[in-house]
Structures are given as structure tokens and as C-alpha cells.
Image (cartoon, rainbow, N blue to C red):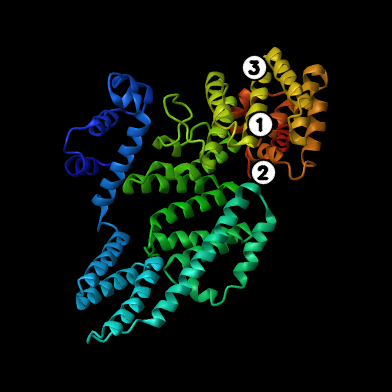
């Protein structure tokens, strides 16, 4: 909350001293929320005994205050308030004034492409027309049927495009090519597509974004994404929350630059995102997606410092910060943070973050939880904690005997660990055999996660007698120009050039 928002809350919603104002004042004074300190401070009060209840009540109070503070500040609030005023005026039978308020709501909705509320307002016109005719009021009034039909069509298209975006969002992490093809085919069959794309509303943006994401040719995709960004920069688009769509679009382009290993362009996008967040004061949690993409890029190239996460929303280094593991991209960032620290030899940081994530993902993210267990094995192996590795292998075997189900890739990976511990002199041969088998595990969720986080890098290190803890340095000596290329190929090429 801003200082002005807090001041508004204090003046209008908590002027009388109460448990809620005391709780708010104390939490507001903390640098970051710490429930243990809150309970200790109110140990002699009802707040400590019923903290959960008071937190819910305080959240409700803050929300009411926020709604009141931002009333008429946003376009949506203006329209909603006008529609509420129309209701009141109709109850008082002040029809001419109601008509004026309703027309104003319609004009604002049209101006700002608020399609959903425009449909509501235009539909209200027809209800009011019927009301007028039924009451035999002399004021002539006709609802704009053409505008209503156009608004309904636009809203229907926007809804369809949002559904297609959700399908692509899911396929982004799963790598499901069939879903992408289905979206592309659906787009082809949308009537008047070119006409829609020339617009400035949500439908125009989503259409352009989907067209770009379903374009297989990367240079063409990048060209389309750059055109969309240019439209944002020239304020071409005019629809609700377009500034967040701008961030999302920058993230898409960032990902395309990462895939094409255009490090200079990646740096430009990160700078643009930093400038946007500095100017607009966005909630830094909107950085989860681009921060994950940057972390993926940095791990691939052996870049030790993440720039975007310096905003503070994502911190895998500060144990006092509560991790946002429920966000898929934040979780992905944390996993890359672990791997980055492993390749820097920061063993203590690895263990701390790994321990937290293993506990947080146990029920909600089972595939990531298994992956983290495998990463823990790698960490102990690299630190020569072979006794711990053997203990973890025995624990896994006991789980199997008790009937716990694991994916075939997971079982094969534990078998690989067992073999390299048992036969260290055959490490290279075993590593090569394991690498050759990995691609054969089709539709295996843990294998997909293994590939997503480039964990073959560790196996490549075994092949080349490299310590995983030295990998950042080794990667910094390579010219990695093909994203997804096996690390072993670049290492072999460097050896040949020597």
C-alpha cells in the first residue's frame, strides 16, 4: 500500500482505536511480515489468541478501504458507479437523469474498450426502454441494438481468444505441440481476422499475440512480437489493464530472444522491464515470468547474477523472505537459483533453499518435488557425501518396496546414481549410456522437468571430468549460440579448437 492509501485507511476506516488498528500499525511497522514477532508482541492480548480471525477481518477492512480510495480513479469504477446511480435514479422515477447517466457510462466504456461493461450498459438500455414504455413515460427512448450486437460479438471473440491463450500457457511448460497446432488452426478459422487485428482493443492484442506464438519460424515470430511491442510503446492499444499485457508481451519477446541466444537483445528487454517497473511502480510479483526466463538464460550461459530478481519480489537468498512457491514461474526461478548456486560452489545456499522448497512442494507440486530430490542427490554427490547418497538411495528403495509409484525416468535416474557410486571407474561410460536413454522416456513428467532445467549439464560434466561447482566458469569460456544444444557438444568443440 502507498502512503496515501494507508492514510486514507486510518482516516476513514480506523479512526477509533481497536484491535484491528493496533494490528495494522504493528504489521505496517515491520520490514517484512513475521507472524512469530506479531504473536509475541500481542502475547497478552486477544489478538495473539485469535490472530487468524483478526487477520481476515483486517484484510476485509483494507479491501473496503482500497475500493473506496480507488473509486472513480479507474475507468471500471467510473462505469460501475454510474450504473449504480442509474439504479437509484430509476427507483426515484427520475428517468431523464437516469438516461443521461447511462449514456455517459456507455460513452466511457466505448472510449476505453471496456467490452464487458459496455455489454452490461447497452443491455441496460433495452431494460430501461421497456421500463419507459411500460410506465408510459413521455421520454422517447430506443436501445442501440447494433452497438449491443457488436459489443456481444467482441466480448464473445475476446472470451474465445482468452481460452486459446490459456491452452498456449499450459503448452508452454508441457511442450505439447498438438495444443499449439490446435490453437493455430482455430485462429485460421476466425472470420474477419485481419479487420480485428487492425483494432486497438483486447481482441486485437490477443489475436496478434496468438499469431506470433503459433508462428514456428523464430525470426518471423520475433518480428511479429517486436511490432506488438512497438504498438504498446506508441500507445496504440487501448483496453483495460493494457500495461500488464505490455509486461506479458515483453516476456514473450524475452523468451524468443533467449531461444535464439541474442544476449544483447535479452539485456535490452531486461532494461526495458526495469524502467517500466521503476516508472509505474508495478507490484514486483508481475516479474515472476520474466525473472524465470532470465534465470533460464543465465543458467544456460553461465551468468551468475540475475538482474530482474533484484526488485525483491523473488529472493532465494534471504531466509527471512517467504517463498512464493504457488506461482509456477517463481518456483521455476527458485530451481534455477539452486542450480546456479550449485555451479558456483555455494553449497550452504543450495542446502537452505533446497530444504525449504522440498517441504513446500511435497503436496502441491509432486513432479517438482521428485526433481528436487534428484537435485539433492546431485548436490551430495558433488560434495563427496557418498554416505548420504547411499542413505537416500536406500530410502528410495524402501519407498518402492512399500508400493509408492514413481515415473520410469525417476527409477532409471536412481539406478544411474547407484551404478556410478558402485562403479566410479566406469563413470564416463555409465554417463554416456544414461544420456542416450533419456530421450526414450516419452510423456514422463519428471523427465520433462529434468530437461526443462537442463540437468543433463551435470551428466555432461561427468563425461568431461568437470566439477559441477565450476560450471559457471566453464560456460563463461564457451560461445553458446544454439539454445538447447547439449553442453557436451560445446565442451567437445572447445577441446578440439585447443
Residue underneath mark 1: 370
Q: How many angstroms separate mark 2 from mark 3 (CA)? A: 27 Å
Pointer 2 or 3: first along the chain = 3
Q: Is residue 318 above or below residue 69?
A: above
User: How many residues crowd mark 2 within 10 Å: few (<14), some (14–19), many (20+)?
Assistant: some
Q: In the rendered image, is residue 22 in sight?
A: yes
Q: Give the left or right position of residue 306, taking residue 275 as reference.
A: right
Residue, x 18% and y 33% (percent of image)? 17
Front tag of 3 and 1: 1
Name the quadrant of the N terminus. top left
Q: Do the residues bearing badges 3 and 1 touch, measured as CB atoms within 8 Å?
A: no
Residue 26's label in the rendered image is none
- Marks counted in the figure total 3
Query: Residue 433: horizontal and vertical position, in percent?
Result: 82, 32
Residue, x 49% and y 66% (percent of image)? 158
Residue underneath mark 3: 383
- Looking at the rendered structure, the secondary structure element under dot 3 is loop
Amino acid at each position: 500500500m502507498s502512503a496515501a492509501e494507508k492514510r486514507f485507511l486510518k482516516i476513514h476506516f480506523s479512526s477509533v482505536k481497536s484491535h484491528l488498528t493496533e494490528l495494522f500499525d504493528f504489521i505496517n511497522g515491520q520490514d517484512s511480515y513475521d507472524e512469530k514477532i506479531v504473536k509475541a508482541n500481542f502475547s497478552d492480548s486477544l489478538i495473539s489468541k485469535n490472530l487468524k480471525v483478526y487477520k481476515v477481518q483486517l484484510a476485509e477492512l483494507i479491501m473496503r478501504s482500497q475500493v473506496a480510495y480507488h473509486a472513480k480513479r479507474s475507468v471500471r469504477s467510473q462505469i460501475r458507479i454510474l450504473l449504480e446511480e442509474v439504479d437509484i435514479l430509476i427507483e426515484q422515477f427520475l428517468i431523464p437523469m437516469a438516461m443521461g447517466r447511462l449514456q455517459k457510462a456507455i460513452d466511457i466504456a466505448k472510449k476505453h474498450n471496456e467490452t464487458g461493461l459496455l455489454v452490461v450498459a447497452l443491455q441496460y438500455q433495452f431494460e430501461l426502454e421497456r421500463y419507459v414504455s411500460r410506465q408510459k413515460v413521455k421520454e422517447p427512448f430506443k436501445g442501440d441494438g447494433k452497438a449491443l450486437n457488436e459489443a456481444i460479438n467482441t466480448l464473445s471473440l475476446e472470451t474465445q481468444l482468452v481460452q486459446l491463450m490459456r491452452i498456449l500457457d499450459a503448452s508452454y511448460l508441457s511442450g505439447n505441440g498438438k495444443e499449439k497446432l490446435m490453437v493455430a488452426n482455430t485462429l485460421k478459422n476466425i472470420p474477419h481476422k485481419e479487420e480485428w487485428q487492425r483494432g486497438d482493443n483486447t481482441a486485437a492484442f490477443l489475436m496478434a499475440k496468438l499469431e506470433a506464438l503459433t508462428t514456428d519460424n523464430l525470426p518471423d515470430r520475433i518480428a511479429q512480437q517486436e511490432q506488438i511491442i512497438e504498438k504498446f510503446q506508441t500507445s496504440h492499444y487501448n483496453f483495460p489493464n493494457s500495461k500488464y499485457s505490455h509486461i506479458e508481451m515483453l516476456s514473450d519477446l524475452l523468451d524468443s530472444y533467449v531461444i535464439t541466444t541474442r544476449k544483447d537483445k535479452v539485456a535490452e528487454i531486461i532494461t526495458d522491464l526495469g524502467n517500466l517497473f521503476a516508472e509505474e511502480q508495478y507490484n514486483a510479483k508481475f516479474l515472476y515470468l520474466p525473472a524465470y526466463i532470465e534465470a533460464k538464460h543465465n543458467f544456460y550461459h553461465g551468468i551468475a547474477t540475475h538482474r530482474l530478481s533484484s526488485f525483491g519480489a523473488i529472493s532465494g537468498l534471504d531466509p527471512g523472505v517467504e517463498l512464493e512457491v504457488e506461482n509456477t514461474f517463481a518456483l521455476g526461478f527458485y530451481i534455477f537459483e539452486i542450480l546456479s548456486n550449485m555451479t558456483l560452489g555455494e553449497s550452504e545456499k543450495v542446502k537452505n533453499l533446497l530444504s525449504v522448497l522440498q517441504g513446500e512442494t511435497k503436496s502441491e507440486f509432486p513432479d517438482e518435488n521428485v526433481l528436487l530430490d534428484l537435485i539433492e542427490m546431485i548436490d551430495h554427490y558433488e560434495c563427496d557425501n557418498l554416505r548420504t547418497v547411499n542413505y537416500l538411495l536406500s530410502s528410495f528403495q524402501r519407498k518402492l518396496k512399500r508400493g509408492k509409484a514413481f515415473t520410469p525416468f525417476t527409477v532409471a535416474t536412481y539406478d544411474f546414481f547407484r551404478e556410478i557410486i558402485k562403479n566410479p571407474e566406469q563413470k564416463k561410460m555409465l554417463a554416456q549410456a544414461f544420456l542416450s536413454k533419456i530421450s526414450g522416456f516419452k510423456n514422463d513428467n519428471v523427465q520433462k522437468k529434468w530437461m526443462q532445467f537442463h540437468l543433463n549439464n551435470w551428466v555432461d560434466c561427468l563425461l568431461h571430468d568437470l566439477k559441477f561447482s565450476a560450471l559457471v566458469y566453464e560456460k563463461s569460456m564457451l560461445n553458446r549460440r544454439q539454445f538447447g544444444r547439449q553442453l557436451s557438444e560445446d565442451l567437445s568443440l572447445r577441446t578440439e579448437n585447443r
